[in-house]
Amino acid sequence: MVSTRREFLKAAGIAVGTITACSSSGALLRAAEPAPVAPQNAGESPQSHRTDWMYRAKWGVFMHYLAASADLPVDDWNRLVDGIDVESLASQIQSVGAGYFFITLGQNSGHYLAPNASYDSFVAIRPSKCSRRDLVADLHAALAPRKISLMVYLPAGAPDRDLVALKALKWKKGPYRNAEFQRKWQQVVAEWSRRWGPKVRGWWFDGCYWPNAMYRTSTPPNFRTFADAARHGNPASAIAFNPGVFYPIFAEAAEEDYTAGEIDDPVRVHCRGRWVDGAQFHMLSFLGSNWSRGEPRFPAARIAEITAGIVRPGGVVTWDVPHGPTGRISGSFMRQLDAIGNDLANIKR
């Protein structure tokens, strides 16, 4: 059983429908927030960039593997994580031609897919809700021989449904500085980054909804120290900070390498080139009826067309898919991924 990203937004006190807004000029606005970093020309490109490999990959697959409840017993969580068949999953990803794979490290329940001593020392929950198995390391071992890169997802805030963790981490939901929390969270992130080193090629941080209050300051902790923590074990890691669902897609901070690009309706997305706000243009959306659930909402040919429409001008696309208990992707979604891979094989980079 898993919870979804939409449920994360609700738990964080964010109404998805209210974070999408346009001014009369079409510029995206957020109450009490300044405009994002000034955009570069869509064709402007540095000589090299942390996302060059991502640009060549063109597209990838995202999977939410999350505990359904903060009260899920640790033994049950460990059994679920131990049951993920990384070889079978990696074989599926390889068969559709995706260039990278995203896995959630955890979310609101406080259960995580890999050990982390820093997290355990801060929250003092025993037994630990961090799994015994290092699923990220095991996924890399299965994906790397197939030349598929690995990226990870993590909320920028504390697990909202774990009241013990919330108190221990000193997290206050909303537009607050949260400096003590940030210092602790960055230690957690840095430990995972050291643990995996170059095995993890990118991070996607969710819930960066109050950038002015928490991150846009020259005094640490800030966007720079957050990015440094994620790159502690791999300076080449590509990073994105998610501001929420916005049309059009933009980069939230100068420190990120690609746009988080969370989108509910991919039909509304228009990519004019590789670069937006100095970052690689990237869209993340779901193939099912919602995040990690339901049946395909578009015909396979249509989803392939949408993907190619973003990739052809220079963008990158990630699709979230539901999964079974062992991580296997069902046949209906494999057919969609196959259609995407076949169509994008004709786009050369």
Image (cartoon, helix red, strand yellow):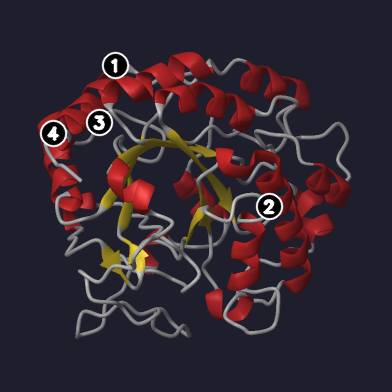
Percent of width and height locating residue 44? 25, 71
Residue 251, how many percent across, how many down? 39, 69
Q: Amino acid at mark 4?
A: Asp
Residue under the point 58% across and 56% down: 235
Q: Which residue is mark 3?
A: 296
Q: Are marks 4 and 1 in contact (CB under 8 Å)?
A: no
Q: Which residue is the site of mark 1?
A: 331
Seen in the picture, residue 168 relative to 87 is either above or below; the reply is below
Q: Looking at the image, is mark 2 or mark 4 earlier in the sequence?
A: 2
**Badge 4 or badge 1: first in the primary sequence:** 1
Q: Which amino acid, mark 2?
A: Val
The amino acid pointed to by label 1 is Gly
Q: N-terminal of the two: label 2 or label 3?
A: 2
Q: CA distance from mark 4 to mark 3?
A: 18 Å
Q: Is residue 3 above or below residue 271?
A: above
* Residue drawn 89% across the image and 45% down it: 124
